Image (cartoon, rainbow, N blue to C red):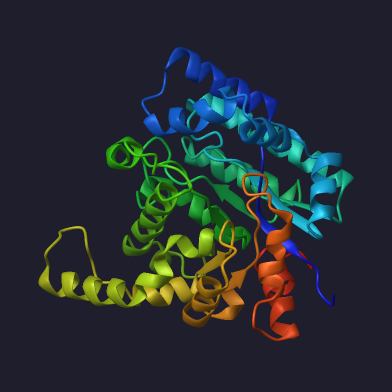
Amino acid sequence: MGYLRIATEEAFATVEMFDCYRQIIRNKSLDDPGFYSLWGFFLESDSDVPTAVRRKLLDLDEERIQDMDASGIARQVISLTAPGVQVLDSATAVSIASQANDQLAEAVAKYPDRFSGLAAMAPQNPQAAAKEIERGVKSLGFHGVILNSHTQGEYFDDPKFWEIFEAADALDVPIYLHPNTPSRGMIEPLLELGLDGAIYGFAVETGMHLLRIIVSGVFDRFPNLKIVVGHLGEALPFWLFRLDFMHDRMVRAGRYENVKALKKNISDYLRENVWITTSGMAWEPAIMFVRSVIGADHVMYAMDYPYQFVPEEVKVTDDLPITDAELKAFYQTNAESIFSLA
């Protein structure tokens, strides 16, 4: 074809993490309705979709390779599925993240031409998280960090988490900001009508998290920091004009104590510091729009395996109205650049 299809938002899980999830569900020990909505379904339902998703998440071997071959995926960039270890107590989270990274590293070593990994970490302990990121990159050969959005209702605009940004920045690896179900403070109107998950709630929660990171001044503090976000940017590219206009107006009016002037426009950070994948959004008009407003060099392919494993969806992106060179960048070289895969 003249290019390799690299899928950049592909998930896995471990038995140990699922055991922790089941214990939370059994004991009702977590104050997080979104977690119970998502994992109460995927772990306890015996219907076809959750059964297949559980099996495929735990597989880092032949079935995953077969599914990749069925859809023409040359390489997966694999990360620990949401919410990862971020719903666990601090000590358990640190331990499970380390175990998950070791298991992923073993799979990458077995299939070095097919798998690449992102390091899991426990934001509950920022210092330990920074050390695990360094171990993941320097010792295990990973190419970035997975952050499954909010950690028990806390967001990364809080400077107590910035040691994690500092570690990723120093190692020159991106942080993949993956959705989580909305936190207790925002979920109820969504949960009432089943809108809390991938249909809409994920985008609302993760888009807001990225905005909080931007307006808190993270990119002014770490100008070379790189964040990757899926699902065509969680709707933010469609709001660029209004985000810039209203942020500038609020700053000048002094309306909010915590809203300060930034060195650049919000849209500038989204174009310069953020990379966007197409995970779960195999829709030509939206892909072409995001490429036009964000920049083609910051948009790349993802499938969202195994949650949205639809092999024929690659036909949509194969047929994008772009040149062969642009298609190669979209599928291959943009990912190789941001994740240092080449």
The quadrant of the picture occupied by the N terminus is bottom right
Q: Nearer the viewer, residue 340 or 126?
A: 340
Up-down relation of residue 122 to residue 28 (above or below): below
Q: Residue at x 80, y 68 (%)?
A: 4
Task: Give the number of marks.
Answer: 0
Up-down relation of residue 215 to residue 180 (above or below): below
Q: Is residue 9 visible?
A: yes
Q: Is residue 108 visible?
A: no
Left or right: residue 249 compared with residue 19: left
Residue 22 percent across, percent down from the top left:
56, 19
The residue sitting at the top extreme is: 27
The quadrant of the picture occupied by the C terminus is bottom right
Q: Residue at x 54, y 65 (%)?
A: 226
Left or right: residue 120 compared with residue 252: right
Residue 169 percent across, percent down from the top left:
55, 61
- Answer with the quarter of the image where residue 219 lies: bottom left
- Answer with the quarter of the image where residue 98 lies: top right
Up-down relation of residue 29 to residue 270 (above or below): above
- Answer with the quarter of the image where residue 248 lies: bottom left
Residue 275 percent across, percent down from the top left:
55, 68
Left or right: residue 245 compared with residue 287: left
Residue 10 percent across, percent down from the top left:
67, 50
Q: Residue at x 44, y 48 (%)?
A: 202
